[in-house]
Structure formats: structure tokens, C-alpha cells
Amino acid sequence: MDQEKTMPAPEEQFDEQQPVETNLTPSPEQQTVEPKIEKQSYANLSLPEILLEFDRLLNLGDYVELQRNAELLRSCFYKGLCRERGEEPVPEALSFASDGQTELVPEESEETESKEAITEAQDEPLLYVEEENAFKRMYARFRAMRGEFVKQQELQKEHNLRVKQTIIEELKVLVEKQEDPNHTFPEFRVLQTRWKEVGPVPIANTKDIWDTYQHYVEKFYDYVKINNEFRDLDFKKNLEQKILLCEKAEELLLESSIVSAFHKLQKLHEEWRESGPVAREHREQVWDRFKATTASINKKYQEFFEEQKKVQKKNLEEKTILCEKAEELTAVETNEANEWNRRSRELEKLQKMWKSIGFASKKDNQKIYDRFKAASNAFHNAKRQYYSQFKHNMQDNYERKMALCEQAEALQDSEEWRKTSDLLINLQRQWKEVGPVARKQSDKIWKRFRSACDKFFENKAKHFNEIDENFDDNLKKKEALIQEIHSYQPSGNNNENLSMLKDFQRRWTEIGFVPIKEKEKLQTAYRQALDLHFGALRANEGDRGLGKFKKRIEDMQGGGKSDRAFRSEREKLLHKFRQMESDIALWENNMGFFAKSRNAESMIADMERKIVQAKEELRLVEEKIKLMDKQLD
């Protein structure tokens, strides 16, 4: 913190030496810790005695006494708890309380809760659980009391702000009177006294309210032009007070705790701010003396804080890496028992590494621990669910697919072409809805089901090939239509182009069947011809959609969304991509199962359109995944 940058130069102060506005209150991320507090008074107490003492302090009603001892009791309790359980003592972490005072806080949330998570996973009972739970309830009461105390302080600051605003208004009226100083000066002193008696205001309003007050004080001195004798006496008293403040500030240079010295300096600055002006010939000298001491203390504090900040930042980075590794263990699905065992061993290693790393900053420490604990819990939950459902689901799926095979085999020799086609297509739909089976059974049972379906549809195709006499003529018509599609030049109107392409599809369906040996080649040529035009139409819409999607993912990262939410979005797209690939493969396979009839030809055309649209959508999804991968890189 560069204190000199926040203080006005002497020439910027008005003649009556206004108190200097400083900004010495550390921001939350700059707050750090004081050296350890001696615990000899509580260190030898047993756990029940500590509980009795904590309960006494809670019921005493003295918040100052409770605030001074609560964290000390907490440290001694958890040291004693670890000692009784035969565990390593929990390290202590130092942090700042919400009111800016330094307090000693054992980091129970990280070390102790990590032990609980591991112990719970090992199903081993803990000692003194009831005592620990009783202490946690008492500490929760203390935190609630502290929250209420801070809330009341903030309300009092708001009240103080309103009081000071009222004093400013009265001072403004006094300045505007411009009466005899003998009448106005006593009123002015009363207002100054009232101002000093009012406590602090919200930090956001401190500078503005002070600047406004000093503005009217300056105007008052300008207007009333107080006589030199009275003014010199006031200046002399103020100079003595400021010299005393300089001496007190210089004594802080010898303070063993730089954090304690820093906080005491804030109070000295408040006194300086409230003290009156001094004569011009002493103004710069006394201010330079006080400012030099302030700069020295600030430099020491900044060095101490920066060192603490570096260590905490490094610890946070190391713990973040452990969280990411723990999350990766659960993120990728697996159906292999050996893989689950390997991941369990890996998680145990991560937990040991976690315990060896120190604490992060107060604002980040609980968050990073919660993240690691959530990843560990998610892994154990997934593992338990896997072992409880794996065998049952696989066997159930196998039995359902065996039943579908038997139904398909019962229909494979049927000559009720239309009815049986619908039945087999329904069986295929059911097959898709059934989950996976064991890998060693998967290929075998699929080949059995596919063989039954293929046999029926091959018989059906052979039957209809024998009764159709116009295939060659239809072949020539469809070849001509393909050439017409290739020759079509799209206009600038997408609606007209889409209407024309639908007309091509209608005419193709009306033509009828072609020889079976030419069907696949002709169908491919027809599909490619249409795909060229449909692709061009959808590319424009798709590219615009990709532009919007790119803007959205940039906003996601720029708006502070977590990396976890970003990766979740990508996983959804990847799942959709795989599902669409599977659907397209099934649709293309099913096209060979349709009956050889005019109505079936219409179904084939519809299916082809559906496949074209799905492929274009698949392309867009793939492009979105690539955009997200690029953004992640």
C-alpha cells in the first residue's frame, strides 16, 4: 500500500490546517495475521473443561470478552481433540475477523473435515464425537453473536452518517449567517465538539462526508475572520496535539507486531483528522514528520502482507490442481471394476497431498476445501452406485435383448410384409432403448438380432423386385431428375430455393422403384445432389448460429462463470453429438428395411430429408465443440 499517494500535499491544505484524509484501512485481501497468541491459560484444560468455559463466556453476555477468547478456546479444543484421538495436531491459521481485529482461527474446515471425509470413507468410529458436536454448536452461537454485533455496528455507522449530515447542515447555516464572531464562534465550537463525539460512518461515505465538513469549516474561518489572538491560541493547542501524535506514531516503529502497529496507526490518523489546524509556518513540518512515520510503517506492513499473500496464493494454486485432478476422476464414466480401483488409489494419494499443503487466503480457503470435498464425495457416491447397479443392470438388459432376438426370429420368415415391417421396426426401436450388456455378450447378441431382421427384409426385397416391371424406366427418370437437381441454380430467396428442393423430393418419391442393384448408387447420387443445396441453405443459418454461440461462450467466461460450468456445457454438446451419430447410423440402416411400395418410397424420402438435416445439425454441434475447445485452450 503506497500511503503517500493517498495523502494531500501540504500546499493543498487550507490555512487552518485541515486534518488529512487518509485511506489506511486494508482491503479484505490485504488483511493478514498477527503472531500467535499465548494459550497457556487454556492449554492444560480437558475437553469438558473447555466446553464449560466456552458455555460460561457465551452466557456471560460480554461480547468483548467472548471475542477475545473464543478463537483461543477453539484452538485449544481441537488440539486436545487431536491429542485424545491420537492424531497429528491441527495447524493453526491466522486470519482477520470481519471487524478488522486480528484473531487466531484454527483451520478446522480444512484439516479436521478432511480427516472426517477420509474416516467416513474408511467406516472407522471417531472418539469424542459428542464433545466435538457440542463445541461446534457453541461456536455456531458465537458466530451468530458476532454477525449480529457486526450488523449493529453497520447500523450505528449509518446512524452516525445521518448525524454528521445534520451537523454539516447546521454548520452550513452558521456559515451563511455571517454574524459577529463573538456570537457564531461558540456555536461553531459546539458543532465541532458534536462532530468529534459522533462515531465512524460507512467507509464508502467517509471521504465525502469529511471533505464536505472540512469545506464548511474552511468557509467558516474565511467568513468570520476570527481574531488573531484567539486563532493563535487555537493553533498552539492544535500543534501540541499533532506533535504528540507524531511521537506516538514514531513509537509504533518499535512495535514487535507490524499488524498491531498498523491498526494502532489507523487510530492515530483518526485523531489527526479530528485535530484542528496549526499555523502556516508549522504546518508542513509537522505534517512531513507524521507522514514519514506513516510511510515507514506502511512499507513494513506491505512487505509482510505481500509475503503472506505469495504463500497463500501458491497454496491455492496447488490445491486448485488437486481439485481438478479429483474432479477428473469422476468426470469420465467407466464400467470397469479395475479402473474404479485404480481411481480410488489415485484419490487417496490426492488426499495425502492435500494435507501436506498449507492454507490459502481466508476468502478462498473454505471455497477450495468445499470444492475438493465435493469432488471426493462425488467420486465415492459414483463408485458405490456403480457396484450396486452394475451387475443387476447388465443382466436385466441381456434378458430384455434376448427376448427381442426371439421375437425377431419368430418374424423372419413371415410374408406379411407391411405388418411385419412395422413390428420389426418397433423391435429395433426397443433395442435402442435397452441399455448395454456385458462386452463379451454384446457383439454376439447384436449379430443374432441383426441377422433375423436382415433375413426378413432381404426376403421382402426379393419379393418386390420380382413383381416390379417398371424399374428400368424409373431408373432413367431418376437419373434425369438428379441431373436436373445438379443443374438447378439457387436464387437469392431462401424460401423459393427451399420450395424448389421440396418439389424435387416430391417428384423423386412419385417416380417409384429402380432395380435393386442400382438403388444404392442412385440413392447416394440423389442424396449428394440434394445435400449440396440443403447444405448451402443451412450453412448460412448455421454460421449465424455459430456466431451467436461463440459470443455466448465468450460472455460465459468473461462474466465470471466457473470453469466447471463451462466444461459441463461442453459435455452436454459432446453427449448430443454422440447421440446424433448413433441416430443417423440407425436411420441409414433402417432405410434398407422399408417395404418395396410407393408408400414406403415416401417414407424413404422423408427419412432422407431427416438424415440430411441431422447431418447438418451434427456439423454445427461439432463446430460448437471445437469453439469451446479453442476457448478452453
Image: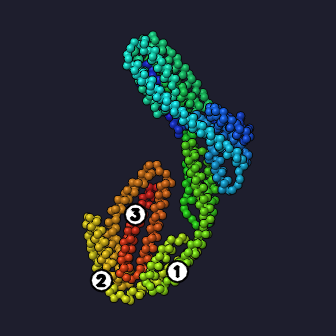
Query: Which sits earlier in the primary sequence, circle 2 or circle 3?
Result: 2
What is the crowding at mark 3: few (fewer than 14 residues within 10 Å), some, or many (at least 20)? some
Label of residue 609 in the image? none
Where residue 533 sits, quadrant-wise, is: bottom left
Where residue 69 sits, quadrant-wise, is: top right
Relative depth, front residue between 601 and 1: 601
Identified by mark 3, the residue type is Leu
Relative depth, front residue between 604 and 55: 55
In the depicted structure, whether residue 373 falls above or below residue 225: below
Which residue occupies 50% across, 74% down? Answer: 430
Q: Position of residue 540 (x, y in %)?
A: 33, 62
Q: What element does badge 3 sit on?
A: helix
Q: Which residue is mark 3?
A: 620
Query: Which sits earlier in the primary sequence, circle 1 or circle 3?
Result: 1
Query: Which sits earlier in the primary sequence, circle 1 or circle 2?
Result: 1
Where residue 94 sits, quadrant-wise, is: top right
Identified by mark 1, the residue type is Gln
Q: Which residue is mark 1?
A: 407
Which mark is nearer the camera, 1 or 2?
A: 1
Label of residue 476 in the image? 2
Which residue occupies 62% across, 61% down? Answer: 384
